[in-house]
Image (cartoon, rainbow, N blue to C red):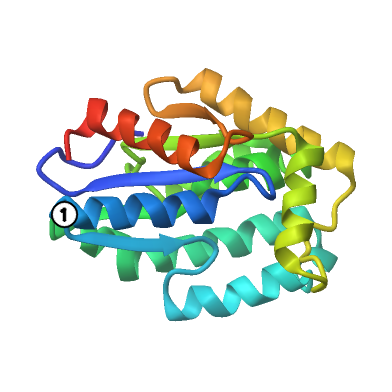
Amino acid sequence: MQRHAPEAGRFITFEGGEGSGKSTQAGILANRLARAGRNVLATREPGGSPASEEIREALLSGRVWQFGPFAEALMFAVARADHIEGQIGQALHEGKWVVCDRFLDSTRAYQGATAGVPRGLINALERLTVGGLLPDITFMLDIPAEEGLARAAERRSGNVPDRFENQELTLHERVRRAFLDIAEEEPDRCVVIDASQPEAMVAEDVWEVVLQRLSP
C-alpha cells in the first residue's frame, strides 16, 4: 500500500493498549496543531462518523464479540470504511491534518495477533477499506499492560469496563507485543513512545517527532 499524495493533508494516528493515553495525547496534539495554524480534524475509531459511532457502541459493549473475532474484525472494517469515506478522506483532500485515536493497527493487534484472525484476512479487509491510505505517522504509545490497566480502571471511576478492558492480563500483554511488532516491521511509519512517562513528557516527545517529520 502507498500513502496518499503529498499535496493532500497529513494523517497522524495514535495506537496502544488500554490506559496508554492515546485519547489524551491525540487531543493534545490536535490542539497544538490548531494553535500552530493548521486546520485539524480530530477523530477516533471505532467511530468518527454517525454510522460508525453506532457500530462503536455495539463493539465496545461486546455484542459483536459473541459472533467471534472475524465478525468483530468485519464490523471494525465496516466502521472504518464509512469513517474514511465520510470524514478522513474528504478532510485530507481539503488539506486538513487528521489526528485519529486508533486506526488499522488496532485491528491488526486485537483481532489479528491476539484474537487469531488470520493475517491474510486482515490484509484483505485493509485492501477493501483502507486501500492506499496509510498514516504519515503512527505513534505507538507503549506502557506495561498491568500499569495501563490500572490507569484505565482509575479513569473509569467505577464504571463497567468495556469489552476490551475486560480481557485477561495475558491478552493485554499480547496486544502490547503486537503493537511493538508492527512498529518494528514498519519503522518509517511507526514511532514508539514511552507512555509510562508523565503526560507532559509524552506530549513533548510526540511534538518533537511531528516537527522533525512533518514541519507543521
The amino acid type, in three-letter code, at marker 1 is Arg
Look at the image and tell me whether residue 17 can be seen: yes
How many numbered marks are there?
1
Q: Which residue is mark 1?
A: 38
In-front residue for pair 76/187? 187
What x and y, as percent, mark residue 55? Answer: 59, 74
What residue lies at 69% left-to-right and 49% top-to-bottom? 18
In-front residue for pair 32/187? 32
In-front residue for pair 152/119? 152
Q: Is residue 169 left or right of residue 178?
A: right
Picture quadrant where residue 155 is located: bottom right
Q: Is residue 85 left or right of residue 58?
A: left
Look at the image and tell me whether residue 129 can be seen: no
Helix, strand or loop under label 1: loop
Q: Is residue 127 left or right of residue 164?
A: left
What residue lies at 85% left-to-right and 52% top-to-bottom? 167
Q: Quadrant of the N terminus?
A: top left
Picture quadrant where residue 210 is located: top left
What x and y, as percent, mark residue 148? Answer: 73, 44
Q: Quadrant of the C terminus?
A: top left
What residue lies at 78% left-to-right and 69% top-to-bottom? 62
What residue lies at 35% left-to-right and 44% top-to-bottom? 12
Q: Is residue 89 left or right of residue 157?
A: left
